[in-house]
């Protein structure tokens, strides 16, 4: 999704802005640009494609300045092209924007009637012209920006500069993330603090509705027009490290970080064979009251929630529903008292999940229905964490690869911790099962490490996928969501069409697709469904399908003609979904590398989907 960087300093900040854009590349984009003011003159560079193209253009032109804004664009209105790339300008005004201005067409018509000429197909350009027009009646840039905000419908974050007022930068947060970086005698803005780590580790997190005036030596924040102070948070910069190290791609690094990430996540909650007393202690009274769980999430996080639905009901007998946030938010579901609304999100900024959360909170308040909200999230400073009653952090560290890996497995670990916690406060879990699960959680990092040792074998199997156009992933029970996740990973990064199915559904459609050319990936842990799954494998083989089976070492499943097997070390059946995520991640990764795709930034996708 679009990324914003901006700043105001005494020095030339073109390098800071370009480095910031590089650090936002992971969000997904198709063009990039920047605008800077030097000696009262506005200059701009914009390029289609990678930030490297923009860096080259900036070097050629020597663009510089001490106040500026920059942007990576992920096309929504108008195709990726130089004239649609941000910043957009109107005379001396330049604007960068993340989000969507829903009523831009109507505003455009009004502005055209006033004589403004448009040079792009974007929704953003209206903002530049609106600010220019407002400045005719109101010379102060911040007041002019504030005056146009009521006209804008949609979700957006904005950075705005004016060459006639070169000592300030205006920023707006209204539905899309934006953070202020506090330097020494300089200030910056960005969609993600990662972009600003080279210049500061001190941040101010803006709230929805905030408008900001940054000068070199001051920051003024207004909440819906009223001046307000927001705290400065200092981050431990080492935690935010984001280099690929020895790995070829972030995705591979993140796959291999999983043993440690899961270890960190569980260690925050477990002490030997027990839950720590202070783990979610402040949530004890609420969790005792919870009668249902409603999970809301998107993408890979949704798949983690699907696994947890089995766990909530089977382990602690707590009814659990799950829905994709983009559906939930518009369905206006009935609000049920004493429900725990559980948002799962790597970023904590996903637009649909946030909107669903806000809708449910608003309607629960209006109807005076007691509910609880919780986020399972990887970013401690995110909107979702700030807007829920309780949260549980996945301690995966920054995830840069667009295809989520370590965030997923740590979400599963965190969900299991939550289930143990609720089981304990509601006394709905036996001591024996609790002990079995805690010991299995501690065992997980070791089994993940052993599973990662199969990397070379999975690489050799991946060669058999390179020429394929389609692929099926099958699993049962908690491994049905892992089949969905495997298919999602493969399509996201290798662009091979893949479907995940509950193996029991095979006869109801997908079997028709199976032929000599159809690889079928099977997830076969040692669980109660194994015999049924073996029958499904026979059905595929009888139709000429080629099987790629990730099977428990004691499953009795072995290599034979058109059946490739990778044996996965044994683990408690409850936690097997965490382990079986690894081979499907590695398979997708290697297939994508062999097909030569952009693994960390697959085409058309974004890491953090901050618009609908
Ligand atoms: C995007 C990302 C996915 C992610 C999904 C939900 O589609 O590419 O990897 O699973 O958003 O994101 P969230 O941050 O809410 O987990």
Image: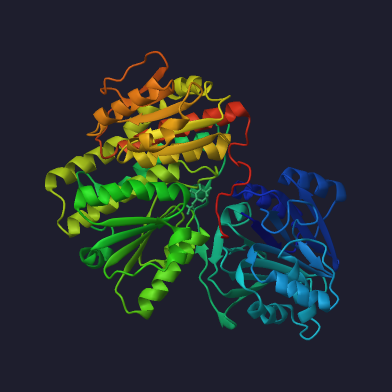
Residue 495 percent across, percent down from the top left? 58, 36
Residue 508 percent across, percent down from the top left? 38, 38
Residue found 77% across the figure and 63% down from its top = 88
Question: In this rendering, would 432 be left or right of 384?
Answer: left
Residue found 29% across the figure and 22% down from its top = 553
Camera-nearest residue between 199 and 389: 389
Of the 4 image quadrants, the one containing the C terminus is: bottom right
Q: Is residue 150 above or below residue 31?
A: below
Q: Quadrant of residue 548?
A: top left
Question: In this rendering, would 86 be left or right of 612?
Answer: right
Question: In this rendering, would 131 be left or right of 38?
Answer: left
Camera-nearest residue between 606 and 378: 606
Residue 420 percent across, percent down from the top left? 23, 51
Instruction: Report if residue 490 is visible in the image.
Output: no
Q: Is residue 179 above or below residue 379?
A: below
Instruction: Report if residue 503 is visible in the image.
Output: yes
Question: In this rendering, would 347 be left or right of 164?
Answer: left
Residue found 37% across the figure and 42% down from its top = 481
């Amino acid at each position: 999704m679009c990324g914003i960087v901006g700043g105001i300093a005494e020095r030339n900040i073109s390098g800071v802005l370009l480095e910031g854009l590089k650090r936002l590349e992971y969000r997904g984009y198709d063009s990039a640009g920047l605008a800077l003011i030097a000696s009262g003159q506005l200059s701009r560079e914009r390029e289609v494609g990678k930030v490297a193209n923009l860096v080259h253009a900036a070097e050629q032109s020597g663009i510089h300045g001490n106040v500026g804004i920059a942007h990576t664009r992920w096309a929504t209105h108008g195709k990726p092209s130089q004239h649609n790339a941000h910043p957009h300008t109107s005379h001396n005004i330049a604007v960068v924007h993340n989000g969507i201005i829903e009523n831009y067409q109507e505003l455009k018509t009004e502005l055209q009637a006033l004589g403004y000429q448009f040079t792009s197909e974007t929704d953003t350009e209206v903002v530049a012209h609106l600010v220019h027009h407002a400045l005719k009646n109101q010379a102060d840039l911040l007041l002019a920006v504030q005056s146009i905000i009521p006209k804008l419908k949609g979700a957006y974050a904005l950075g705005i500069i004016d060459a006639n007022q070169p000592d300030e930068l205006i920023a707006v947060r209204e539905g899309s993330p934006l953070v202020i970086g506090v330097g020494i005698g300089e200030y910056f803005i960005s969609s993600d603090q990662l972009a600003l780590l080279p210049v500061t580790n001190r941040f101010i997190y803006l709230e929805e509705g905030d408008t900001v005036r940054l000068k070199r030596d001051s920051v003024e924040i207004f909440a819906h027009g009223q001046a307000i102070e927001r705290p400065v948070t200092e981050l431990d910069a080492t935690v935010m490290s984001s280099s690929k190290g020895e790995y070829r791609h972030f995705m591979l690094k993140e796959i291999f970080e999983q043993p440690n990430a899961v270890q960190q996540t569980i260690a925050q909650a477990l002490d030997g064979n027990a839950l720590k007393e202070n783990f979610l202690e402040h949530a004890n009274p609420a969790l005792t009251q919870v009668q249902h769980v409603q999970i809301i999430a998107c993408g890979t996080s949704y798949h983690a929630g699907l696994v947890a639905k089995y766990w909530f009901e089977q382990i602690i007998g707590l009814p659990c529903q799950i829905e994709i946030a983009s559906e939930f938010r518009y369905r206006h579901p009935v609000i049920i008292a004493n429900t725990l609304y559980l948002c799962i999100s790597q970023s904590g900024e996903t637009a649909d999940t946030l909107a669903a959360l806000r809708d449910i909170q608003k309607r629960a308040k209006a109807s005076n229905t007691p509910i609880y909200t919780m986020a399972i999230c990887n970013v401690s400073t995110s909107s979702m964490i700030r807007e829920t009653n309780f949260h549980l952090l996945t301690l995966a560290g920054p995830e840069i690869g667009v295809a989520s890996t370590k965030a997923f497995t740590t979400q599963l670990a965190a969900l299991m911790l939550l289930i143990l916690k609720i089981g304990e406060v509601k006394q709905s879990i036996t001591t024996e099962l609790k002990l079995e699960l805690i010991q299995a959680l501690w065992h997980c990092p070791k089994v993940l490490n052993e599973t990662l040792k199969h990397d070379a074998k999975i690489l050799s199997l991946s060669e058999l996928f390179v020429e394929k156009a389609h692929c099926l992933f099958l699993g049962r029970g908690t491994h049905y969501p892992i089949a969905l996740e495997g298919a999602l990973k493969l399509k996201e990064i290798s662009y091979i069409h893949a479907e995940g199915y509950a193996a029991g559904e095979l006869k109801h459609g997908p079997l028709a697709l199976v032929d000599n050319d159809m690889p079928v990936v099977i997830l076969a842990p040692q669980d109660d469904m194994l015999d049924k799954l073996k029958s499904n494998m026979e059905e595929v083989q009888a139709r000429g399908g080629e099987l790629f089976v990730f099977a428990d070492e004691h499953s009795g499943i072995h290599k034979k003609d058109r059946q490739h097997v990778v044996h996965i070390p044994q683990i408690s059946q409850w936690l097997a979904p965490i382990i079986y995520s690894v081979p499907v991640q590695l398979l997708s990764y290697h297939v994508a590398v062999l097909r030569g795709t952009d693994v960390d930034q697959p085409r058309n996708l974004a890491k953090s989907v901050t618009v609908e």
